[in-house]
Image: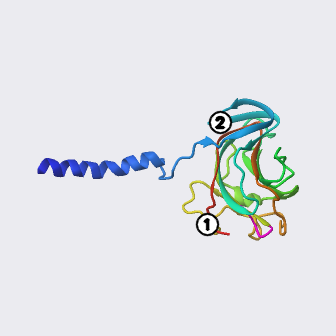
């Protein structure tokens, strides 16, 4: 009986450690891999389901799965921008109506290196706005680990961005919310994506996780 009690106690003590290891040291589930996709254009030094690295000119891939034109989805992104040049960027493209997923169609969120900082621009069908630098103080070029919510409902695009280690993903604690006053250089009111194609544009950068999942924040 005493041995049985000791064995049960060991299981109880070890189980939380196992769960923590599976979820990462901070208790968050690790995100790996890249959704199935097709090369559209560009030069790739590595291209597989674990990592995509591309140099200039900008390379693009289109994901195999599309999303409904009027819908909301989240996107897991892990990326590293080149530390040696400023001409380094990764763009997430949603709701494009063009199968070649150009950065002028749909909702485009671009992360680009600016020295030791990251600049973010958000555009809808080519109309671009800059994210306030005060919202990006903890964004580092070498280790972008983010969750994006891209909403495209009621003829209105909305983008929310969180660092993945944020506890709970709500509009209130998003680093960036395009519907919140002051987050953008000016409003994107009345603009939305017209299609369902999703893709990435990669310039002198590496993407190690890219996947579409259910939205985090309700519309």
Relative image position of residue 142 (x, y in whole percent): 67, 41
Q: Residue at x 78, y 59 (%)?
A: 131
In the rendered image, is residue 97 in sight? Answer: yes
Q: Main secondary structure of the magenta part?
A: strand
Could you say where residue 145 lies in the image, as x and y percent from the top left? 63, 48
Establish if 36 lies above or below 170. Answer: above
- Check residue 170 in the rendering and tell me which mark sits there, or answer none: 1
Above or below, 6 against 215 in this view is: above
Residue at 81 percent of width and 59 percent of height: 193
x%, y% of residue 125?
86, 56
Which sits earlier in the primary sequence, circle 2 or circle 1?
2
Instruction: Identify which residue, 151 or 140, lies in the foreground.
Output: 151
Q: Quadrant of the C terminus?
A: bottom right
- For marks 2 and 1, give the one nearer the viewer: 2
Q: Nearer the viewer, residue 60 or 135?
A: 60
Please state the horizontal and vertical placement of residue 158, each as a whole percent of the image: 75, 64
Classify 10 Å Cα crowding around label 1: few (below 14), some (14-19), many (20 and above). some
The picture quadrant where one finds residue 201 is top right
- Name the quadrant containing residue 89: top right
On residue 51, the disc is 2
- Which segment is the magenta one? 151-155
The image's colouring method is: rainbow
Q: In what element is the residue under mark 2?
A: loop
How many marks on residues?
2
User: Which label belongs to residue 93?
Assistant: none
**Position of 182 relative to 193 (above/below):** below
Q: CA distance from mark 2 to mark 1?
A: 29 Å
Is residue 48 on the magenta stretch? no
Neighbor class of circle 2 (other Cα within 10 Å; few <14, some 14-19, many 20+) is: some
């Amino acid at each position: 009986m005493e041995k049985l009690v000791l064995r049960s106690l060991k299981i109880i003590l070890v189980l939380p450690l196992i769960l923590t290891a599976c979820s990462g040291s901070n208790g968050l589930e690790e995100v790996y891999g890249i959704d199935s996709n097709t090369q559209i254009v560009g030069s790739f030094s590595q291209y597989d389901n674990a990592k995509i690295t591309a140099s200039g000119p900008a390379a693009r891939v289109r994901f195999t799965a599309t999303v409904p034109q009027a819908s909301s989805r989240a996107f897991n992104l892990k990326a590293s921008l080149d530390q040696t040049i400023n001409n380094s960027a990764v763009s997430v493209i949603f709701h494009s109506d063009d199968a070649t997923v150009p950065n002028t169609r749909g909702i485009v969120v671009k992360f680009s290196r600016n020295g030791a900082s990251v600049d973010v621009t958000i555009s809808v069908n080519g109309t671009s706005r800059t994210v306030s630098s005060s919202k990006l103080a903890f964004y580092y070029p070498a280790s972008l680990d983010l969750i994006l919510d891209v909403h495209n409902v009621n003829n209105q695009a909305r983008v929310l961005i969180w660092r993945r280690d944020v506890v709970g993903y709500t509009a209130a604690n998003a680093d960036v919310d395009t519907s919140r006053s002051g987050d953008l250089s000016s409003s994107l009111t009345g603009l939305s994506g017209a299609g369902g194609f999703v893709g990435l544009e990669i310039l002198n950068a590496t993407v190690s996780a890219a996947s579409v999942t259910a939205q985090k924040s309700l519309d």
